[in-house]
Image: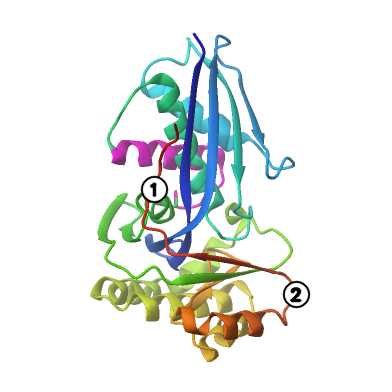
């Protein structure tokens, strides 16, 4: 019998970047990664292909599969062949690793015909991302927004969701993606810790419900710390965005925009080199595919 599984997880953008102090928040968006897993009779051999970006490392695929097999004590019984396909640009601050980890873990569970609780699924993916070296904090905020949809406000150190907001209008989201990749694991953590107190204040602001203002201010201060031009976000705000800011450690900038202002923000950003992605806030949960 062939043991195969398929699953999808959805994208996310930064509201509060957790790297400086361990407190974060992220917002689900309708970008996605799909994973296909075929378990094999070759224990210890995990082969992965990233169909949408073949040049990228497959270490996260290997770690995510291994975490699930180890959880069930099946690492000496199965290997795996894995394919992922995504419309999320890699290494642009758009949570591609967290989303892929969620999708792969779910697909392996589907192949095994096993079910476990949501928080265990999340933690297996976060553990895989840490072991793969693709994250600094484990990105629990990003993983939870990807998995559950909506807006999650988190304590990444404790891997705890402090607030999950699903009653949120599905505004359009515009994402400006410059050329050039920036890998989170290579970011200057020491420099980002300089703004830890300010980020804690923004986190409290988000918990109070002022998450659009928090997202904008987070983007501005991280842009300054990391050497990006905050003008991209300010252009979006000038043209009617509710919130705009650097996503993750960049270089992408995301803007939450009311429908009536989309054309204005798009026009302002089209003057910059790079490409635009148009999506919207996602409220769907990651899930197995039939």
Residue at 31% x, 27% y is 115
Q: Is residue 134 magenta?
A: yes
Q: Which residues are magenta?
A: 118-138
Query: For residue 114, which quarter of the picture?
Result: top left
Q: Is residue 194 above or below residue 28?
A: below
| Residue under pointer 1 | 147
192 and 33: which one is in front?
33
Q: Position of residue 113 (x, y in %)?
A: 37, 21
Residue at point 36%, 54% (across, down):
156
Q: Position of residue 286 (x, y in %)?
A: 40, 44
How far separated are the C-alphas under marks 2 and 1? Answer: 32 Å
Q: Quadrant of the C terminus?
A: top left
Question: Which of the two residues, 20 or 277, is positioned nearer the viewer here?
Answer: 277
Give the label on residue 247, or none.
none
For residue 182, say whether it is visible: yes
| Mark 1 secondary-structure assignment | helix
Q: Is residue 84 left or right of residue 181?
A: left
* Residue 26 to residue 263: above or below: above
Residue where numbered disc 2 is placed: 273
Left/right of residue 93 with respect to residue 151 in the rendered view: right
* Dominant SS in magenta: helix
């Amino acid at each position: 019998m062939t043991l195969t599984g398929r699953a999808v997880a959805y994208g996310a953008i930064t509201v509060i970047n957790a790297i400086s102090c361990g407190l974060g928040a992220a917002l689900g968006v309708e970008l996605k990664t799909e994973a296909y897993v075929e378990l094999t009779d070759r224990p210890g051999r995990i082969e992965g292909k990233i169909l949408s970006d073949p040049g990228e490392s497959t270490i996260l695929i290997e770690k995510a599969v291994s975490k699930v097999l180890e959880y069930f004590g099946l690492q000496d019984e199965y290997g795996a062949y894995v394919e992922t396909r995504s419309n999320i640009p890699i290494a642009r601050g758009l949570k591609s690793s967290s989303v892929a980890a969620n999708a792969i873990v779910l697909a392996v569970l589907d192949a095994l015909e096993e079910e476990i609780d949501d928080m265990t699924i999340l933690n297996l993916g976060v553990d895989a991302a840490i072991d793969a070296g693709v994250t600094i904090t484990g990105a629990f905020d990003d993983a939870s927004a990807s998995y559950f949809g909506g807006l999650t406000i988190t304590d990444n150190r404790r891997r705890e969701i402090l607030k999950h907001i699903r009653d949120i209008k599905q505004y359009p989201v515009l994402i400006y993606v410059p050329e050039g990749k920036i890998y989170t694991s290579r970011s200057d953590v020491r420099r980002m810790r300089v703004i830890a107190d300010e980020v804690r204040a923004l986190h409290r602001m988000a918990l109070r419900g002022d998450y659009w203002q928090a997202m904008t201010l987070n983007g501005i201060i991280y842009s300054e710390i990391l050497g990006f031009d905050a003008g991209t976000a300010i252009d979006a705000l000038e043209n009617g965005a509710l919130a705009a800011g650097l996503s993750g450690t960049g270089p992408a900038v995301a803007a939450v925009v009311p429908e009536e202002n989309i054309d204005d923000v798009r026009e302002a950003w089209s003057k910059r080199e790079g490409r635009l992605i148009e999506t919207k806030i996602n409220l769907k949960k990651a899930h197995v595919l039939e």
